[in-house]
């Protein structure tokens, strides 16, 4: 309860400060009106207008109009932005010629997109020394994915989702690193709760509520702590950006999958609100092998035995999800703003077969935050996150039985300040607590364990010159069991002509989870074997070097990047000394090496072409055998063409992904067994029509090549395909429909 009491005290102090601030604050003296248009003079509804260095902003209405109230005093800069267009700034001292007429030009590339994840401060993508990938709202609309898993698979090469044993939930692997090494954030806050094997529950992310996704590759432990060894995925959700906004969408496939969402909100002067309700359903299904799987078994004496398995089937669990997300915002003064977020999620897992019980996942979150602008160059924020994630068995005749509970609290005080025009200093203090109840503890007795971490971090963002910049920082974690650990990081960027050269080094840190420390679980409940934790586990660390070359010229943007990671004391689940049970332990050092290539052409006449390639060499050595399931080669590609015909905007999008085969060794008793997983190729086609008054219809053809795995029952690194599918989506912008 300590952290809750501390939050109450801090917010009471802030309330007293707010009252005093309001009494001293001068009255508003400037009202700025205007309109934001494209090059042809068409209004841009939903364009963002905000004052740089403050919390004051507004959105344009259906006619592209905005109204903004500011106080007099000093030099101020207005920034106008809209997805797919180059941002524009307007600077004024005292008086403003109103109404302002702002014309935005189409962006030739996405490098003007403002990102925050890599540095915790807003910066245009082209100026970020940390290698960052952005998935925009435009990208999401073109793909029209049913869920987050599908979206990431088609956008990121080197990423694959498989299904976990038991729960059937997605398990992620990215650049050869498992899901536990990639930190997922929602609006900058860590997501708690384990869906399966140290992976979060990816189903809880409502893809219709995503504004953009920022992906930072490589260790980011300096800013984000444990679990950020392999990178950070920050999912930024939508806000109200107009006086009134409302959207309704429905999606249905010929296989019975359904998705419905309703959202609405407002932004009026100092107050904003945005609410999203969603329902998603996917029925469970079963897929049969087309042929038996061939394995090779290596005996201790080196003898190879070839065997062909029987033709089997695999079951894929479905889901029935209800979810609500809420955001509030209020500006007490020009300098002080309160945000409040909350959500509730409930997922009933759907089974292929009749069963008396099923898994039920649920979570609720509370996330208030305060932002105080000391002046144009200094920002102070205080945030608190409470998240409670639960898993239950639900019986038809008996009350539900809670088997998993993860309660986390995070309190953060963060400062960002610009010093001397060339330095941005970020510093912060965090308190993180976790209380975990897991069915792997004490054989399901309901026993709970706690962990606390106290954090200090410091980062310097230095623009040495117009061409050269660097970001350097260090984070210190003090864990109640593992004591003090420091994680440094440095990233450099040098621009010359059309080239941007980046390089860096980062140390990653992963503290053993409570499950890895304290497990005691009878697998299967029938004495098959036990899974034990290990309280003697060491902290896992990594050292990674990265480099990249980016070229931007006109309609073309491309990059080549590489990384080398060496892991020390990697944590894994393996056999006990007697070979009868399993236990978490620190294994031999591992390495991962990879190269990524990306290219995009964005033609002014409506065609966009993009493609990405990833190579990863993941070595997880077990007695001279590589047990990694990472596929060494992968591709994603996309083509989008849009054209306006009269009052209707038509578009066609083709997206695809390919992954190479991979040979995987695993140990069975004293033998090693080799499995060869086949390549995968999946392509989706979406045809969309944007009609007047905010009406949009999309017809999608999934898996147009009708790809099916030959041996789905043996390959848990992918989700089995069901053949060609048809999907129809209808979306209505209520604000545009009624011209609000």
Image (cartoon, helix red, strand yellow):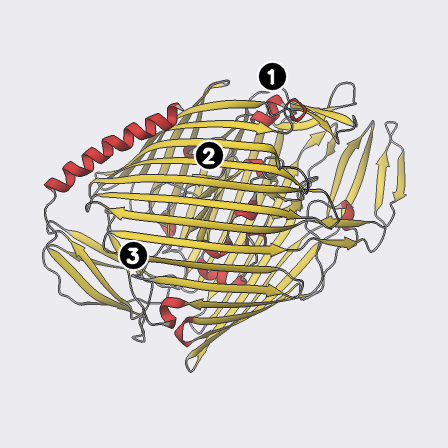
Q: Are marks 3 and 1 in contact (CB under 8 Å)?
A: no
Q: Which mark is residue 536?
A: 1
> Within 10 angstroms of label 3, few (less than 14), some, or many (20 or more) residues?
many
Q: CA distance from mark 1 to mark 2?
A: 29 Å
Residue 48 location in percent, x, y? 30, 59
Residue, disc 2: 505
Residue 211 location in percent, x, y? 43, 55
239 left or right, relative to 300: left
Give the mark toward the camera: 1 or 2: 1
Residue, disc 3: 267
Q: Secondary structure at mark 3?
A: strand
Residue 476 location in percent, x, y? 41, 24
Which residue occupies 55% across, 49% down?
596
Q: Are marks 1 and 2 in contact (CB under 8 Å)?
A: no
Lower sequence index among marks 2 and 3: 3
Look at the picture and state if 598 lies above or below 423: below
412 left or right, relative to 516: left
Q: CA distance from mark 2 to mark 3?
A: 42 Å
């Amino acid at each position: 309860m300590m952290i809750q009491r501390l939050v109450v005290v801090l917010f009471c102090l802030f309330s007293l400060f707010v009252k005093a601030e309001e009494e001293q604050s001068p009255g508003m003296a400037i009202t700025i009106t205007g309109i934001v248009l494209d090059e042809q003079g068409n209004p841009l509804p939903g364009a963002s207008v905000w004052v740089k260095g403050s919390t004051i902003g507004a959105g344009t209405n259906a006619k592209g109009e905005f109204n903004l109230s500011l106080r007099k005093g000093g030099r101020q800069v207005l920034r106008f932005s809209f997805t797919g267009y180059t941002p524009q700034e307007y600077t004024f001292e005292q008086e403003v010629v109103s109404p302002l007429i702002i014309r935005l030009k189409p962006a030739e590339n996405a490098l003007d997109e403002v990102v925050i994840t890599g540095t915790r401060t807003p910066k245009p993508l082209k100026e970020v020394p940390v290698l960052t990938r952005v998935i925009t709202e435009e990208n999401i609309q073109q793909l029209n994915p049913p869920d987050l898993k599908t979206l990431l698979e088609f956008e990121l090469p080197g990423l694959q989702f498989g299904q976990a044993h038991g729960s059937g939930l997605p398990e992620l692997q990215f650049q050869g690193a498992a899901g536990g090494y990639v930190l997922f954030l929602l609006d900058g806050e860590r997501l708690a709760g384990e869906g399966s094997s140290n992976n979060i529950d990816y189903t809880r992310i409502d893809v219709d509520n995503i504004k953009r996704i920022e992906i930072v590759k490589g260790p980011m432990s300096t800013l984000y702590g444990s679990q950020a060894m392999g990178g950070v995925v920050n999912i930024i959700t939508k806000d109200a950006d107009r006086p009134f906004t409302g959207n309704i969408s429905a999606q249905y496939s010929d296989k019975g999958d359904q998705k419905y969402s309703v959202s609405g909100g407002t932004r009026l002067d100092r107050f904003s609100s945005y609410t999203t309700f969603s329902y998603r359903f996917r029925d469970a299904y079963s897929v049969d092998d087309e042929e038996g799987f061939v394995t090779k078994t290596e005996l201790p004496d080196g003898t190879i035995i070839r065997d062909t398995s029987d033709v089997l089937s695999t079951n894929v669990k479905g889901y029935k999800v209800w979810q609500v997300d809420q955001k509030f915002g209020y500006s007490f003064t020009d300098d002080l703003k309160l945000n409040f977020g909350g959500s509730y999620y409930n997922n009933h897992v759907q089974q292929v077969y009749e069963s008396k019980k099923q898994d039920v996942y649920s979570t609720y979150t509370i996330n208030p935050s305060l932002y105080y602008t000391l002046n144009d160059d200094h920002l102070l924020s205080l945030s608190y996150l409470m998240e409670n994630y639960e898993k239950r068995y639900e019986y038809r005749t008996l009350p539900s039985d809670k088997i998993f509970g993860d309660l986390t609290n995070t309190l953060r005080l963060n400062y960002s300040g610009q010093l001397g025009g060339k330095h941005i200093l970020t510093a912060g203090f965090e308190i993180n607590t976790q209380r975990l109840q897991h069915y792997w503890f004490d054989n399901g007795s309901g026993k709970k364990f706690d962990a606390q971490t106290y954090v200090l971090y410091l980062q310097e963002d230095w623009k040495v010159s117009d061409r050269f910049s660097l970001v350097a920082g260090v984070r210190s974690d003090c864990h109640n069991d593992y004591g003090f650990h420091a994680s440094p990081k440095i990233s450099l960027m040098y621009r010359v002509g059309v080239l941007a050269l980046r390089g860096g080094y980062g140390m990653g840190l992963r503290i053993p989870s409570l499950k890895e420390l304290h497990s005691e679980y009878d697998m299967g409940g029938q004495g098959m074997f036990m899974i034990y934790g290990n309280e003697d586990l060491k902290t896992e660390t990594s050292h990674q070097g990265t480099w990249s070359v980016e070229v931007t010229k006109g309609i073309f943007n491309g990059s080549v990047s590489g990384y080398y990671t060496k892991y020390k004391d990697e944590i894994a689940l393996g056999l006990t000394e007697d070979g009868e049970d399993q236990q978490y332990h620190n294994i031999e050092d591992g390495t991962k090496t990879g190269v990524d290539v990306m290219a995009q052409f964005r033609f002014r006449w409506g065609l966009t072409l993009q493609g990405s390639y990833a190579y990863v060499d993941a070595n997880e050595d077990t007695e001279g055998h590589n047990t990694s399931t990472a596929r060494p080669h992968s591709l994603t590609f996309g083509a989008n063409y849009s054209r306006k015909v009269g009052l209707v905007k038509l578009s066609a999008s083709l997206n695809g992904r390919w992954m190479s085969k991979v040979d995987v060794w695993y140990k069975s008793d004293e033998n090693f067994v080799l499995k060869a997983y086949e390549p995968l190729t999946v392509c989706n086609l979406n045809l969309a029509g944007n009609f007047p008054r905010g009406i949009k219809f999309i017809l999608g053809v999934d898996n147009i090549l009708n790809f099916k795995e030959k041996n789905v029952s043996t390959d848990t690194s992918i989700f089995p395909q069901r053949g060609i599918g048809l999907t129809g989506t209808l979306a209505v912008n209520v604000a545009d429909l009624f011209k609000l």
